[in-house]
Image (spheres, rainbow, N blue to C red):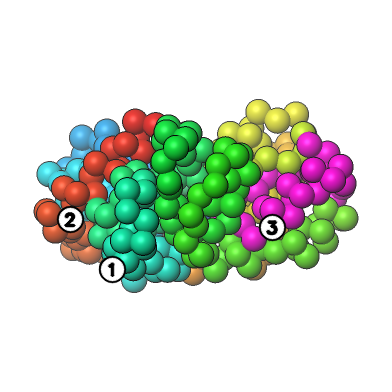
Amino acid sequence: MSLLTTDITTEIADLKRLRHAVILAHNYQIPEIQDLADFVGDSLGLSQAAAHTDAEVIVFCGVHFMAETAAILCPERTVLIPDPQAGCSLAATITAEQLRAWKAEHPGAVVVSYVNTSAEVKAESDYCCTSGNAVKVIQAIPADREVLFLPDMFLGIHLERVTGRKLHLWMGECHVHAGIGPQDLLRIREAHPEAELLIHPECGCASTALYGVSCGVVPQNGVAVLSTEGIIRHARSSTAREFLIATEVGILHRLRRDNPDKTFYPVSESAVCQYMKMITLEKLARSLRDGVYEVRVPTDVADRARGAILRMLELA
Ligand code: 13P
Ligand code: SF4
């Protein structure tokens, strides 16, 4: 660690104490941020951590919809994001107005929104879910009800496959995960045929991998579709020595740090979310120092969105 990094991490620790703040970080954050966060996890774990903290200030090192979710769950706390430009290409694929129009085409349908959505979209939804509990949420809805699932089509296809239900799917995608395609998977599997394959359900290659399993080309116990925290847990408990990781590359830091005796290969080196990487140590220090940038959700929107988020947490 350089002298400069030591100085700034000391400053962050001092400011954190002074402000009674907690630092939450997503698994895709840069290593320096992950290493000093109080909690590192997936969207579900971060929502749970926000809901349970008694800190006065939550500094959310992740993307904007995650900080918004924390602000909705904790209206009495101050929620800060170190860079307000940290958005999400998937959340941007649907607006509340588009969702209202879709709902009008399917009156009475249950709306399930992936947590990667704006607060306004959540306010129009019956349930939220994350990759960590999406299957449970779909299974909790009576089989005779129509379901609108949004916005990620690859996760939607995965849910149809696992639950055996037909869903109406919004055709959204995350540019990072959609970019991890079948060709990347085939290339890396050829190089490491013994490695276990752990895939995030937003990936464009998830269908190909599972098709490979159904054809017998890929051994069944060698593939798992998991949330980012699910990937971390699986790698820890598996007896395999090598893993192919199909998701954003930020997750490799924790995987390698926690499992020094195992080897992890990214399925695509270029799977980098530029929004997650906008959060730096300097911006985190400024956030704590100057109390920027506060994430606020209008009360009427937050009140309508909270029910869908709480239903997600009940089914965690
Ligand atoms: P997880 O909930 O699995 O952490 O995924 C969040 C996300 O944004 C994936 O890109
Ligand atoms: Fe959004 Fe994709 Fe980045 Fe996740 S990786 S935050 S889904 S743009």
Question: Badge 3, how many Cα within 10 Å: few under 14, some, many 20+?
Answer: many
Instruction: Give the alpha-carbon distance from disc 1 to disc 3, as whole Å.
Output: 31 Å
Q: Where residue 176 sits in the image (x, y, percent)?
A: 56, 65
Q: Where residue 122 sits in the image (x, y, percent)?
A: 29, 53
Q: Where residue 312 sits in the image (x, y, percent)?
A: 36, 38
Question: Badge 2, how many Cα within 10 Å: few under 14, some, many 20+?
Answer: some
In magenta, the rendered stretch is: 192-220
Q: Which kind of residue does numbered mark 1 sit on?
A: Glu
- Magenta stretch holds residue 132: no
Instruction: Give the alpha-carbon distance from disc 2 to disc 1, as whole Å.
Output: 14 Å
The residue that label 2 is drawn on is 301
Q: Which mark is residue 205?
A: 3
Residue nearer the viewer, 217 or 11: 217
Determine which quarter of the picture holds residue 297. Answer: bottom left
Q: Is residue 304 left or right of residue 8?
A: left
Q: Is residue 48 left or right of residue 198?
A: left
Q: Which kind of residue does numbered mark 2 sit on?
A: Val
Tell me which label, 2 or 1, sits earlier in the chain: 1
Residue at image position (66%, 36%) is: 235
Mark 1 residue's CB less than 8 Å from ligand 2: no
Tell me which label, 2 or 3, sits earlier in the chain: 3
Report helix, strand or loop for mark 1: helix
Q: Where residue 132 sits in the image (x, y, percent)?
A: 49, 40
Question: Badge 1, how many Cα within 10 Å: few under 14, some, many 20+?
Answer: few
The answer to whether the residue labelled 1 contacts the one labelled 3, judged by CB atoms less than 8 Å apart, is: no
The residue that label 1 is drawn on is 97
Q: Which circle, 1 or 3, is nearer the viewer?
A: 1
